[in-house]
Amino acid sequence: MVNVTDHKFVPDHELLDDPEEIDEVLAEYNVSKTDLPKIKRTDPALPDDAEPGDVIRIVRESRTTDRAIVYRLVIS
């Protein structure tokens, strides 16, 4: 079976497990967790230990800013 997370076009998906870090992100964007874009728990790019309610940081390469960081809320 192929591991999609090893593919060069799949950006890094990192589970944020520090509540203070999550609060800082939410405060920076002035949003609540439920306002974040969603990502399904069944998405093959997610870390294995991601559960509904977790926040994921996705780091993508960008031509204009070198890298772009986005956040997603895991749903079932």
Image (tube, helix red, strand yellow):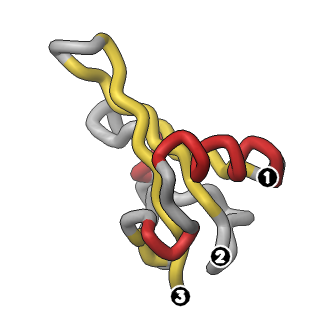
Q: Which residue is mark 2?
A: 53
**In the depicted structure, whether residue 37 falls above or below residue 6:** below
Work out how far the residue at label 1 is from the one at label 3, CA to CA, in angstroms. Answer: 18 Å
**Is disc 1 surrounded by few (<14), some (14 to 19) or many (20+) residues within 10 Å?**
few
At x 34% / y 42%, what residue is drawn?
Answer: 10
**Circle nearer the N terminus (3, 2):** 2
Which of marks 1 and 2 precedes in the sequence?
Answer: 1
Left or right: 58 in relation to 33 = left
Q: Quadrant of residue 38?
A: bottom left
The amino acid at mark 1 is Asp
Who is closer to the viewer here, 44 or 40?
A: 40
Q: Report x, y in % for residue 53.
A: 65, 76
The kind of residue tagged 3 is Ser
In the rendered image, residue 48, in percent from the top left (x then y), is placed at: 67, 63
Q: Which residue is at a point 27% across and 36% down the rendered structure image?
A: 9
In the displayed structure image, the side of residue 4 where residue 25 appears, left or right: right
Q: Name the secondary structure under disc 1.
A: loop
3 or 2: mark nearer the eye = 2
The amino acid type of the residue labelled 2 equals Gly
Residue shown at 48% from the left, 37% from the top: 12
Q: Which mark is residue 17?
A: 1
Pointer 3 residue: 76
Tell me the quarter of the picture where residue 47 sits.
bottom right
